[in-house]
Image (tube, grey):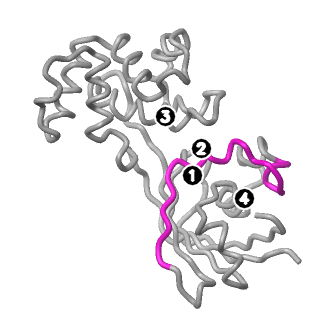
Amino acid sequence: MPNKYKVSIVSKKDVHTLTGIWDADSLRCLLDLADADDIGEIADSDLLDIAVMVLQDLGNQKAGELVLEAVFGETMRPGVRQNLVDDLQESEPWSDFAEVDQQRGIFVAVCLLQQAFPNLYGTPDAVELGVNVKAGAAQDLAPLLELRPEWVVRLLSAGLDQHNILHRLYTDELVSGAFADAPGLIWQLQIGEVGDQGTSCNFTVIASTQLLGSLATGQEFSAVAGQL
């Protein structure tokens, strides 16, 4: 019998970065790629300022390639990185990138490049939703507590218009079965309070505005699925 869920959008806000994306280790990696001197002597609190100055000295093209290399490593070819730099200055460049699993990384790259070149890059925007989901039984929430992105995408898709890009691109995947792109669609997921004897849970999700931006605070909807 299909599992039934009641979903409420508790909160919605724009966010311009993701937690922990440019931590001390990531910034030291970037500076190492830039052949910066005395990296080990730089205090963690100064790393971001130093990284921004190094990028500015390199200029936009080289800085863009370097940031993309720091984010993607060998998973993105040098030629792709070179060609992508100019596209990063467009509005929401991650949304048009064919490799869904790399869209989040493009957002991460723009977060840093915008700080180094504010006149060239717009402020990166994503959407953060606070969601409450209620299930018929505690075991029906297991996929959420296991942080399964395909479950979250399918759950939230029930509140989206059928013309939304999610429904247009993933007609079959939203029903059941394999959903290879799901991990790339959910950029950050955090589980909150579990209540009502395990049948209700709050969670926070961050994704591209293009994907989930049409969901609204106060919106309530039902999701029915046999295999969320």
Q: Quadrant of residue 112?
A: top left
Q: Residue at x 31, y 25 (%)?
A: 30
Q: Nearer the viewer, residue 84 or 179?
A: 179
Mark toward the start of the polypeptide (3 vs 4):
3
Q: CA distance from mark 3 to mark 2?
A: 16 Å
Q: Residue at x 61, y 36 (%)?
A: 101
Mark 4 = which residue?
A: 154
Q: Is residue 196 above or below residue 223?
A: below
Q: Amino acid at mark 3?
A: Gly
Does the CB distance between marks 1 and 2 fall below 8 Å?
yes
Does the CB distance between marks 2 and 4 fall below 8 Å?
no
Q: Quadrant of residue 98?
A: top right
Q: Residue at x 13, y 35 (%)?
A: 46
Q: CA distance from mark 2 to mark 4?
A: 16 Å
Magenta segment: 171-193
Q: Amino acid at mark 4?
A: Arg
Does the CB distance between marks 3 and 4 fall below 8 Å?
no
Q: Quadrant of the N terminus?
A: bottom right
Mark 2 = which residue?
A: 210
Q: CA distance from mark 1 to mark 2?
A: 6 Å
Q: Amino acid at mark 2?
A: Gln
Indicate which label's residue lies in the foreground, 4 or 1: 4
Mark 3 = which residue?
A: 105
Indicate which label's residue lies in the foreground, 2 or 4: 4
Lateral position of residue 168 relative to residue 8, left or right: right
Asked if the stretch drawn in magenta spans residue 25, the answer is no
Mark 1 = which residue?
A: 213
Q: Position of residue 227 (x, y in %)?
A: 81, 64
Mark 4 crowd level (few <14, some 14–19, many ≥20, 10 Å Cα)? many
Q: CA distance from mark 3 to mark 1?
A: 19 Å
